[in-house]
Image: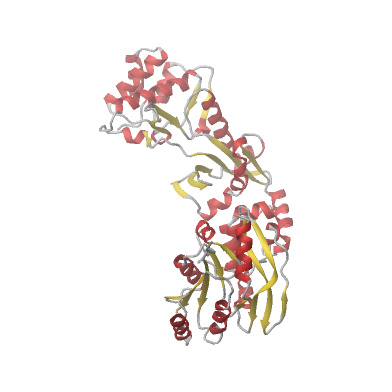
Amino acid sequence: MTEPLVSVVVPVYDMERFIAETLDSVLASDYPNFEVVVVDDGSTDGSAAILDRYAARDSRIRVLRQPNGGVCRARNHAVSEARGEFILPVDSDDRISPTVISDAVAVMEADPDVRVVVPRAEFFGDRTGEWHLPDYSPELLARKNMIPISALYRREDWVRVGGYCEDTVAREDWIFWISVLADGGRVVRLPETGLYYRVREGSKRKSDRKLKRKVIEVLNRRNPEFFERCLGGPLRYRRTWSRMLNRLYRLLHPRRVFIGGRYSALEYFVRTLPAHFRNGDGRAIHLGRNELREFEVAGTEYVVKSFRKPNIINRIVYGLFRSSKAQRSYENAELLLSRGIGTPEPVAWMTERCGLFFTRSYYVCRKSECPHTYVDLIGGGFPQQEEYLRAIARTTAALHELGLLHKDYSRGNILFGRTADGSVRVEIVDLNRIYKYKSIDIVRGCANFAERLPATDSMRAVMAEEYARTRGFDPAECLRLMFRYNVEKK
């Protein structure tokens, strides 16, 4: 059986003093099936000539070239062109042992839950001795970089996380490993020394220390859920104090989180919604007084509504006495579904306070499968328009028969489409302003239905007729009232 191909990727920038030594160590590997993908990142010294000589005499070496763009771009370029199932990054001034690839692949092949195989490492150059790296744990990885860049991983994981972060200025390996391991997976350390890490004046490991604040900013932006799970909040500048500082922050900024039973796996996504909105994550659906964004989590699409911070009076009221808009949206969605009225499935809600003052709330629901809104019906020409108008009228009548009044019953809050069996489905959204009454009479019902929905005369006549028929009212009177109370003319 042929061993899986391993791609050793080597970014090179002005390394004429060391690159030959690095390539010699890789080519001395006892593993029978590997390639070496080298990216010359715009070198200005003699590196390019050295690379060409090595590629000319060994077909396992491929040399790629790009304008100088940094180590992350070079690694991404290399991996994008790599053919191997496994990837082993090697820096252009380091060395690897002859057996490290064979040993690492054996571990990977034996256990599909292993995501990273780490060699034991030693320093050489300006410093010697073993590089003592602690045993892996997610909590420790959240606070410090504990996996060297030269560790074996699956190419599919590079694809899954979007490669190396090209926005970073340092510690790109730490950012990458967190992305790979954020949702689990085992890390195995080999017992034998497999990596020889060169320490020299001006080496990247030393210069990166000066960029700590920027690195932490990038880490928190890319992996808020990982840090929430491991540290109870973001990574802090004083990294070892992060968990304690996050606990103190939560004492001053308490939050309430409710997640529907079958969505418990979304806990850390929900808890980090403020960070996701600050970062501009997801796809913006609406940016205004309130903000709506669409997110895909584990292959499922969700819509999240962030309600704006209320005025000072309501910040106290919502903080102490009244349910938040997000909580009311969730509870109203459950109520509608329990009564057979369509709305996207509610998933979760979350609120935050600053002391006694309410700040923001977030409502999460499944993305609706209805492709249209009432807006699409305006102006005519929409196929089966009358059928959809009648379905909307019946849904409105069902709401009113239950004593439920949607006080923002407008064109963007009525969705519709067809189910798999071809029947019409209508869904109502933006549910925080649904109120319960003992009964809703013809005047209040027609006013609510017509007030904010523009329509042609013929459209209004169809909806009035169906609404009246469903509720047992006089169609002519319903039509008269709808014309009277409509303020949204076509």
Q: On the picture, is 191 further left or further right than 61?
A: right
Whether residue 160 appears in this view of the structure is yes
The answer to which image quadrant residue 396 occupies is top left
Residue at 38% x, 35% y: name it.
Answer: 373
Position above or below: 464 against 297: above
Residue 30 rendering spot, x and y as whole percentages: 59, 74
Q: What quarter of the picture does the C terminus occupy? A: top left
In front here: 351 or 139? 139
Residue 25 rendering spot, x and y as whole percentages: 58, 79
Residue at 63% x, 34% y: name it.
Answer: 322
Residue at 53% x, 44% y: name it.
Answer: 306
Whether residue 149 appears in this view of the structure is no
Q: How is the image coloured?
A: secondary structure
Q: On the picture, is 52 further left or further right than 172?
A: left
Position above or below: 39 against 179: below
Residue 73 rendering spot, x and y as whole percentages: 48, 69
In front here: 399 or 12? 12
| Residue that lies at the very extreme toward the left in this rendered image | 381
In front here: 162 or 52? 52
Q: On the picture, is 25 further left or further right than 76?
A: right
Q: What quarter of the picture does the N terminus occupy? A: bottom right
Residue 346 rendering spot, x and y as whole percentages: 54, 35
Position above or below: 317 against 440: below
